[in-house]
Image: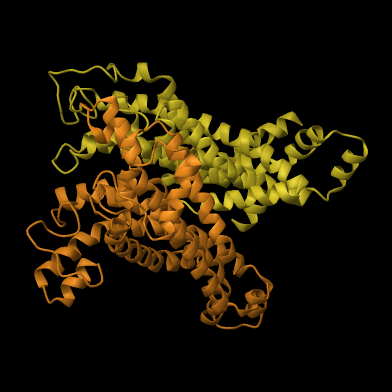
Chain colours: A yellow, B orange
């Protein structure tokens, strides 16, 4: 049961993934490449991503520098590789924070209903009045743009997505026989929620996690692009695109374009894998296709 | 209509939360305003001038009082009334947003329908792949890439520096859209320049709009095609065109609801595009105010966003009512 809870059993079925969903298989492949880049970055390049070389400023791609160098003479390829760590390092904790808040809230409001449910759901509705980027920008700029703050803010802003998903599952499960027998057997409320309901209500949330990670990458790089969050010369993709933006229309395109392409590929991989994951984990989606 | 009754408390709560967030945040605009050479006394005098030495609930009360009289305060950066600043910049944003969303919907809705009707074939695959790409590219990078390709490489487009060539004077303001105003004033050169400045940002908004619309419309139409009455229509041997028409009738309501909900979120996307193209609309203004900590502007901008969203949802409700009179019973 633990394995089902963590989503291992469905993942074991993923071996047939390439046959059933080639798009999802491409997504997983792209993700695997990024994971390799994040883990083995020092082996993949001879350059230090933050070492300035004043003898090689703004070199175009090719020769000694595969993706060229930026205005500080730093190797763009090494910086794009290192940026993978920032992307994963923000997105994964942010999604975990979102689930850690959203799943219990969804379980509780879905099971109890009543005014707590009403108040929280209206609160989430009110949050949707604002574009998420504006909300993230406002909160991060007020809280101070540190890495930890960005992760927490993204997690909190994304928690409603998971709360809603879990809540709707619980609403459907609440009247089920196994809930009634669990109550009759004298389970405490936390035990009922986390042991009996959660494993059955988690599929939708698990399926969404990759897509939400893509969202977290997009928002966090946008913050860095706007100059909030991580600052240059830290090799974070959004900050690199900010550095490259002014050179985009003067001919030194490589400073901004390579991190941009990495960003597109990573979100593409996450979105493709996420679609495949939801087909595997959520049989109802398979029908809607 | 229940939404309308909730509007006043919603705006009050949103106003208060923004207020609290800004005041509790790390930014202190008075120090910035007074300049680096200011003494502590000067900063304190400025704080008193702006009422920032009062307790927060008192400040909020004063702010609400002023808002009710139509006074949103003054920008600390441009030193002009916030309401005037917002109203001056609103047409530029609306022009961009409405043209972009219209173009995006015009491309996205048919593409989604074609994908659903030709499920599993090339058209389906192509439109889904394009939607996925549009969904994966960050808005600001899309805007930068557009400038790189169409301004720098191909030289088809003017640089992304505002709404009109710097050599031209803006036309007299009637609608607020430079293109329309220039046409109305009979100024051909200004109209051409304004229109060519408009194309790239509008295409960016359209791409950002179309991507989610394609996949959502596809899912909605597929859902409708699976219903009993479509199976019945098929079993009767009705012509293909007629079945499509019946399916579209059923898909209209959810599609309108979805596009309406998207529009509220697209305000954020549009402000990023404005930022890259230096469009000077209300989105860019609000974005920069948040980054610089221009409290009064952020406050007014947030209020305006909330009003815009509520208005959008209201329009969607009315359109649904017109499309489906049954909904009134709910």
Indicate left or right for B234 with B171 as reference. Answer: right
Indicate left or right for B127 with A191 as reference. Answer: left
Q: Nearer the viewer, residue B72 or B326?
A: B72
Using the image, determine if residue B257 lies above or below residue A52. below
Indicate left or right for A245 with A106 as reference. Answer: left
Where is residue B204? Give x, y as percent. Answer: 31, 55
Q: Nearer the viewer, residue A221 or B117?
A: A221
Using the image, determine if residue A223 lies above or below residue A121. above
Where is residue A129? Give x, y as percent. Answer: 50, 54
Using the image, determine if residue A45 lies above or below residue B260. above
Using the image, determine if residue B250 lies above or below residue B142. below
Q: Dividing the picture into quarters, in which one does residue B158 lie? A: bottom left
Q: Dividing the picture into quarters, in which one does residue A66 lie? A: top left
Quarter the C terminus of chain A occupies: bottom right
Where is residue A224? Give x, y as percent. Answer: 35, 34
Residue name at image x 69 percent, y 34 percent? A9
Q: Dividing the picture into quarters, in which one does residue A262 lie? A: top left
């Amino acid at each position: 049961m633990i394995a089902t809870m963590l989503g291992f059993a469905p993942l074991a079925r993923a071996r047939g993934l390439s046959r059933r969903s080639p798009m999802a298989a491409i997504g997983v492949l792209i993700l695997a490449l990024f994971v390799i880049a994040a883990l083995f970055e020092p082996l993949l390049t001879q350059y230090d991503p933050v070492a300035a070389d004043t003898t090689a400023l703004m070199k175009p791609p090719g020769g000694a520098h595969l993706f060229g160098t930026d205005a500080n003479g730093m190797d763009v390829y090494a910086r794009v590789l290192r940026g993978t760590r920032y992307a994963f390092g923000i997105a994964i904790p942010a999604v975990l924070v979102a689930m850690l808040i959203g799943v219990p809230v969804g379980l509780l409001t879905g099971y109890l209903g009543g005014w707590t449910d009403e108040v929280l759901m209206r609160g989430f509705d009110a949050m949707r009045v604002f574009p998420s980027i504006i909300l993230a920008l406002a909160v991060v700029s007020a809280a101070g743009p540190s890495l930890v703050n960005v992760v927490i803010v993204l997690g909190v802003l994304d928690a409603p997505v998971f709360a809603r998903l879990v809540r709707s599952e619980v609403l459907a499960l609440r009247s089920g026989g196994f809930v009634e027998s669990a109550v009759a057997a004298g389970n405490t409320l936390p035990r009922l929620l986390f042991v009996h309901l959660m494993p059955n209500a988690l599929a939708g949330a698990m399926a969404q996690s990759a897509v939400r990670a893509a969202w977290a990458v997009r928002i966090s790089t946008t913050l860095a692009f706007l100059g909030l969050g991580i600052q240059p010369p830290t090799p974070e993709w959004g900050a690199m695109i900010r550095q490259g933006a002014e050179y985009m229309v003067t001919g030194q395109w490589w400073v901004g374009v390579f991190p941009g392409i990495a960003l597109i590929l990573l979100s593409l991989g996450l979105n493709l894998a996420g679609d495949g994951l939801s087909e595997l984990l959520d049989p109802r989606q398979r029908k809607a296709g | 209509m229940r939404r309308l009754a909730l509007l006043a408390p919603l705006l009050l709560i949103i106003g208060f939360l923004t207020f609290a967030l800004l005041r509790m945040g790390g930014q202190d605009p008075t120090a910035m305003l007074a300049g680096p050479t200011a003494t502590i006394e000067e900063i304190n005098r400025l704080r008193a001038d702006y009422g920032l030495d009062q307790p927060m609930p008192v400040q909020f009360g004063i702010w609400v009082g002023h808002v009710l009289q139509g006074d949103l305060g003054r920008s600390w950066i441009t030193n002009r009334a916030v309401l005037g600043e917002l109203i001056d910049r609103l047409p530029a944003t609306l022009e961009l947003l409405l043209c972009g969303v219209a173009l995006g919907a015009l491309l996205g809705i048919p593409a989604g329908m074609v994908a659903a009707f030709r499920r599993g074939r090339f058209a389906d695959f192509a439109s889904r792949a394009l939607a996925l790409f549009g969904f994966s590219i960050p808005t600001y990078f899309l805007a930068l890439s557009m400038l790189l390709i169409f301004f720098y490489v191909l030289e088809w487009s003017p640089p992304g520096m505002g709404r009109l060539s710097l050599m031209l004077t803006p036309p007299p303001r009637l609608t607020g859209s430079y293109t329309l105003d220039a046409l109305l004033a009979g100024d051909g050169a200004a109209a051409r320049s304004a229109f060519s400045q408009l194309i790239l940002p509008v295409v960016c908004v359209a791409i950002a709009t179309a991507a989610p619309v394609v996949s959502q419309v596809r899912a909605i139409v597929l859902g409708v095609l699976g219903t009993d009455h479509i199976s019945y229509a098929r079993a009767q041997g009705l012509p293909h065109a007629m079945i499509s028409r019946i399916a579209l009738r059923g898909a209209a309501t959810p599609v309108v609801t979805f596009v309406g909900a998207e529009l509220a979120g697209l305000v954020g996307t549009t402000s990023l595009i404005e930022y890259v193209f230096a469009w000077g609309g209300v989105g860019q203004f609000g974005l920069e105010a948040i980054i610089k900590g221009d409290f009064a502007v952020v406050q007014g901008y947030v209020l305006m966003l909330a009003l815009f969203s509520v208005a959008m949802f209201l329009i969607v409700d009315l359109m649904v009512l017109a499309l489906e009179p049954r909904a009134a019973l709910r």
